[in-house]
Image (cartoon, grey):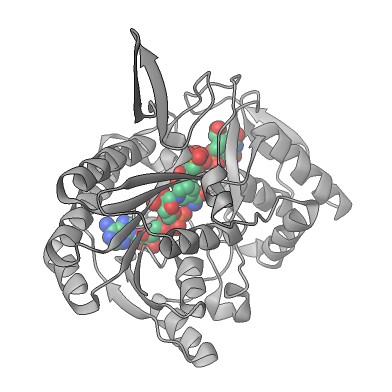
Amino acid sequence: MKIIVAGGDGFCGWPTALYLSKQGHDVAILDNLVRRKIDDELHSNSVTPIASLEDRVNKWKEITGKEIKTFVGDLNHYDFLAQVFEQFEPDAFVHFAEQRSAPYSMIDREHAVYTQTNNVMGNLNVLYAIKEFAPECHLIKLGTMGEYGTPNIDIEEGYIEIEHKGRKDTVPYPKQPGSFYHLSKVHDSHNIQFACKIWGIRATDLNQGVVYGLHTEETKLDPALNNRLDYDGVYGTALNRFISQAAIDHNLTVYGSGNQTRAFLNIEDTVRCVEIAADNPADNGEFRVFNQFTEWFSVQELADKVQKVAKEEGIDISVDHLENPRVEKEEHYYNAINTKLRDLGLEPHLLTDEVIRDILKTVIEHKERVIKDNVLPSISWK
Ligand code: NAD
Ligand code: USQ
């Protein structure tokens, strides 16, 4: 298959591009490299040193003989996007290319507007490009479990059957997202569903949980293929952040009670889920939704796990409860369904002490790169 990985220079996109290339697909990366510029804006960095996109794909070719083409440009420049579609003629378009930090979207008006413009308009351009240049192309779009929020009922996969005043219908599951970033994903989902209905586009929305880890078999082949690992208060996500904190002897930063629960998966499962979606495309006109996670944990449970493994490695840190910078429920019901990817063959890599230890050892190797001022949260929802 000819597959474009948009956002292929990022944390999820890079290992996915390598994995799909290894599986024999003809892969091209589209990325405007804005994530690297945001590191400069935030005076932050990846714990792991990462090579330039050019060096990354050159090293991949040198090691495997496989070529990954690159298109450096912005989804919001439609002329550029049109050219990419005309030249590459994709069978599938994997769309990771969005601003993905909830705290970044909550910095101020400008960052909220940037996030929603970049994400919603970029995705709308992709929908138009598929309609205009590749109507059979399968859109595999990264959504988020955070679209659903934390309702007091089970979270279904995209749709819910409801009975109202004696009549029944199956409707999109209600969305109660928790940041302007998460809202951008809801807006994307609505636009994709509408485009499927009116133009007959085929699309899969992968409502992904929080991703942890950094290595895949492919990224481990050479330091030039390293994946990025975010630890800062803006882009770092719960588990990877706690492990990075342990590596520098920093107490773990649980926000509020820590009883807030989220769905998680290993980066090794992210790449496989995308492959499963590509191998089993949605039908023409179908807007399919998969919940892409393998387990759920409260933030406290994650901190406890990291504290235990760190202790075994001779690192003694405590779990701090910081005033929560976010507006979110800290006590809530959580039960989310995730059977569709499992039914199509996903075999989860679950979170074990060994997985935590492995990430911890990598961070320790590079711990002098961690900028300590970036560790505590600095952005408030209010
Ligand atoms: P990332 O920031 O590391 O990567 C995103 C990439 O997209 C970056 O390389 C960036 O330069 C590029 N990009 C952004 N806007 C672009 C544009 N307009 N045109 C071209 N390129 C653009 O993020 P990630 O962690 O790899 O996340 C990838 C996707 O998966 C996002 O859509 C995110 O919402 C979703 N997701 C991520 C997680 C997670 O825990 N990391 C969880 C659930 C969903
Ligand atoms: N949290 C802490 N301490 C920290 C960091 C986070 O207690 O140091 C808590 C947060 O308050 C929140 C939970 O951990 O309750 C998750 O926060 P996060 O930063 O790990 O994840 P989130 O902001 O939800 O965003 C991340 C990705 C985003 C993706 C989302 C999946 O950045 O792109 O969409 O995970 S989900 O959470 O399922 O929506």
Quadrant of image for the N terminus: bottom left
Quarter of the view holding residue 159: top left
Which residue is more in the foreground, 323 or 373?
A: 323
Which residue is more in the foreground, 21 or 58?
A: 21
- Left or right, 87 with respect to 325, comes to left
Residue at x 44% of width, y 58% of height: 277
- Left or right, 368 with respect to 79, comes to right
Which residue is more in the foreground, 299 or 242?
A: 299
Quarter of the view holding residue 154: top right
Residue 185 placed where, x, y %? 34, 41
Residue 35 placed where, x, y %? 38, 59
Which residue is more in the foreground, 11 or 154?
A: 154
Looking at the picture, does residue 222 appear above or below residue 264?
Answer: below
Residue 4 placed where, x, y %? 33, 69
Any part of residue 118 in sight: yes
Residue 8 placed where, x, y %? 40, 67
Any part of residue 12 in sight: no
Quadrant of image for the C terminus: top left
- What is the number of callouts on the image? 0
Looking at the picture, does residue 370 appear above or below residue 193?
Answer: below
Looking at the picture, does residue 18 appear above or below residue 65?
Answer: above
Residue at x 78% of width, y 37% of height: 318
- Left or right, 290 with respect to 356, comes to left
